[in-house]
Amino acid sequence: MQEKAIAHPTDARLLDVARRLIVRHAKRAGIALKMTYEREGKTLRRRAGGYAHAKQFRRLKTVLRRQRTIVGVLIREVRRKMEPMSELAADLKGRLTTVLERAERIRTQKTKDKNKLYAMHAPEVECIGKGKARKPYEFGVKASIAVTHGKGLVVGARTFPGNPYDAHTLASQLEQTATLLQDIGVKPGTAVVDLTYRGVDGEVAPVQVIHRGKSKRLGAAQKAWVRRRQAIEPVIGHLKADHRMDRCWLKGSQGDALHAVLCAAGFNIRWLLRALAERAAKAAKALFFALLWLWASLQGLWRGHQAAVVPARSSSRSSACAQGDRLRTLITTRPVAGGEFRKADSLSQINGVAKEM
């Protein structure tokens, strides 16, 4: 669902907008109106809002009846004064005629009517109920998104005016996907969908349609594909939250179609930039560890070179150290097996070593 950039349509607001547009375009065409109902129109709109908030629906119906009467008076007066104006420019006359036709639709439409008009500037807007508790009705056009099964890259984005049944949109969506992928020589072979697309296998052949309604006939890999299908939900959420698909500001049905494609292109561009950033991070990490290894290797070679050039100790110093070790060994001699020190031998040995030093 791709919503249109319109205010929430209420009867009071639509009738007041129709009145103001009729007055504005009549003034541009040079038609002098007896009354514009500007002050009364503002008062009626304010009263309608108060009555609707207080749930005083009988008084609200009275206000709406008066607003319809005012719009009808203005429509008839403009049409009556526009007929003899043969010198009126074609573009002004066309715009004024379009405004009068749409105002007449708003004035005469009822609550349960089909193909109602929800905005004067966007007649293509439709009311779609998706069963959401926070938003029972959305006003815009139905949109379909196709993504790859593995990486989640958007390969199709299309709008469907007229609010068709979901299953009847699959063939058109696969056609667009095949058209977009023809340059790389890839064709969609399997469509993993939800249960609303049941019964359209013949329309999209030879593409295989898989959904959880066929669980008894699916293999292990296909069941994994069905579980993977819900990965499209966050993609739709990112398209609406990060790429402005939640509200379309372009004009007409063609603007809706272009807006869906542009939002999908923006998602893919950000996806590619993120993939390039990840690859660059991996390459930088590998380069860092390579430089670290090289630095460690060079440091080891330098230490080995320093150990090779250090001069050896002198012979006199080495002999003195050896004699000192012998003296410490003699001083720390432990008792012999008999349990007594051999003092005479130990003292004579110590004196001999001391003389040598």
Image: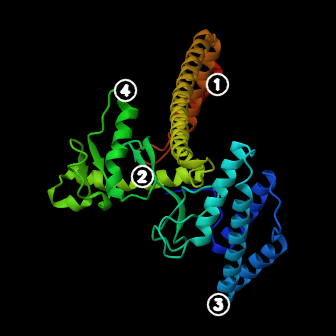
Q: Nearer the viewer, residue 125 or 21?
A: 21
Query: Residue 76's x, y, as percent?
Result: 69, 66
According to the picture, the residue beneath numbered tag 4 turns out to be 184
Q: CA distance from mark 1 to mark 3?
A: 127 Å
- Per the image, label 4 sits on a secondary structure element best described as helix
Are dots 1 and 2 in contact, CB under 8 Å? no
Are dots 4 and 2 in contact, CB under 8 Å? no
Q: Looking at the image, tell me whether mark 2 or mark 3 is earlier in sequence order.
A: 3
Q: Nearer the viewer, residue 147 or 256?
A: 256
Q: CA distance from mark 2 to mark 3?
A: 46 Å
Between label 1 and label 3, give the one nearer the viewer.
3
According to the picture, the residue beneath numbered tag 3 turns out to be 58
Q: CA distance from mark 1 to mark 2?
A: 92 Å
Q: Nearer the viewer, residue 59 or 194?
A: 59
- Per the image, label 3 sits on a secondary structure element best described as helix
Q: CA distance from mark 4 to mark 2?
A: 23 Å
Q: Looking at the image, tell me whether mark 4 or mark 3 is earlier in sequence order.
A: 3
Between label 1 and label 4, give the one nearer the viewer.
4
According to the picture, the residue beneath numbered tag 1 turns out to be 354
According to the picture, the residue beneath numbered tag 2 turns out to be 232
Are dots 2 and 3 in contact, CB under 8 Å? no
- Per the image, label 1 sits on a secondary structure element best described as helix
Q: Looking at the image, tell me whether mark 4 or mark 2 is earlier in sequence order.
A: 4
Residue drawn at the location 73% of the way across and 73% of the way down: 70
Q: CA distance from mark 1 to mark 4?
A: 95 Å
Outermost residue to the front: 84
Circle 1: residue type: Ala
Between label 1 and label 2, give the one nearer the viewer.
2
Q: Looking at the image, tell me whether mark 1 or mark 2 is earlier in sequence order.
A: 2
Outermost residue to the left: 217
Circle 4: residue type: Ile
